[in-house]
Amino acid sequence: MQQNPDRIRLSEQPFRSLSPAVQRASTVVFDSLADFARRKERQPDGFSYGITGTPIARELESRVAALEGGGHCIVTPSGASALFLTIMGFVRGGDHLLVSASCYGSLKTFATKWLAEFGVDVELFAPESGAEIEAMLRPNTRMICLEAPGTVTMEMADIPAVVEVARRRGVLTMMDNTWASPLAFRPLDVGVDFSIEAATKYFGGHSDLLAGTVSMRDFAHYATLRETQSILGQQTSPDDCFLILRGLETFKLRFEAQAASALRVASWLNAHPAVDEVLFPALPGSRGHAIWQRDFRGHGCLLSIVLQPAPEAAFEAFFDTLRMFVIGASWGGVHSLAAYYPAPLQRDRAFPLTDRAIVRLSIGLEDCDALIADLDTALQAFDRTRA
């Protein structure tokens, strides 16, 4: 059959697009037996099997590493997996692991209920710690796990002070930096060894994927974590990598808009009689504000509030009245969310901030006046029910 010359000419033309190509693959093929036998030598940057990613994963890792100010990055299937992968790469039985009491709940559970069973000596420390953490270090302390501000309670650790102690004593540090993102704080710049982001939140931005990233500057650490990713099977879907890359195109605009609204909402809540305390380090006069102002260039969209003492029915009235805020546990996307952390959870945690319930709010891209009006109506319902 004779081919159409126009079709041939079209197929020979280069294809260019603003969108990255999505390469889905489990199996990587090789040109020779020698190449196959030496396939592990392609790590940490090359491709030996789909479990460590395809070219679109490398493109995402390169973009995130540049944002973080680091040389290397590994993308994982979730923010939690990024935290666990980092620990599993370096912590072994017989080691001592320090974990902030305000770290992500799954990390604390993983450490205290799994790692402890594997012979790791796990110890929680006060979330607002600084140089005084040196008193907790032992000869076998391997890593310090930080998050600032805390996931729900928003405590601010003195990160530079902790890092100075850790470096002097030869202890690794990792920090969950999702709240601030690399736009507002870059942990690697102050000497943190591993900067963790839940890409589920700001990077993706639309509440439709799960992913995490680990960024670092030390090549040996990078090689270790790539091998750990391969062994533990922590591959991220190429399609999710594409969605995160798309989210990064609007990341800065979304982050700045949501941050501005969050500060407005926090200021309004701070003056409301039903609110006992606003937990938001970027708010002047709040807990941790001095450290935030010294070390951070901006702030996130997540804040928490402690309401006046009230029965459970008042909290139910508050949440049932909300219309703009959707009830959900995640945050950082374009839609505003509200979550509830009851009093028993606060009383039972190590180093409790309060003995009362906490309401957490993630501020999205909706009209800020409408969000404030929604909270006002919900707080009126809260007040009526607690009266």
Image (cartoon, grey):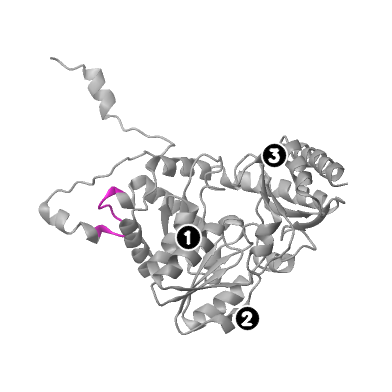
Q: Is residue 295 left or right of residue 84?
A: right
- 174 to 180, vertically: above or below: below
In percent of width and height, residue 280 lies at 72, 57
Q: Residue at x 56, y 67 (%)?
A: 146
Do labels 2 and 3 touch, CB within 8 Å?
Answer: no
Q: Residue 325 shows which numbered tag?
A: 3
Was residue 48 drawn as part of the magenta stretch in this picture? yes
Which amino acid lies under the numbered mark 3 shown in the image of this protein? Phe
Q: Residues within 10 Å of mark 2 (few under 14, many from 20)?
A: few
User: Cα distance, mark 1 to mark 2?
Assistant: 24 Å
Please tell me which of labels 2 and 3 falls first in the chain: 2
Q: Is residue 135 visible?
A: yes
- Stretch in magenta: 42-50
- The residue to which callout 2 is attached is 132
How many residues crowd mark 1 within 10 Å: few (<14), some (14–19), many (20+)? many
Q: Can residue 69 be seen in this snapshot?
A: no
x, y (%) of residue 140? 44, 81
Residue 229 position, x and y percent, is 35, 57
Image coords of residue 84 (percent x, y) = 44, 60
Residue closer to the observer: 109 or 275: 109
Outermost residue, top direction?
1
Amino acid type for the residue under numbered disc 1 = Leu
What residue is shown with label 1?
83
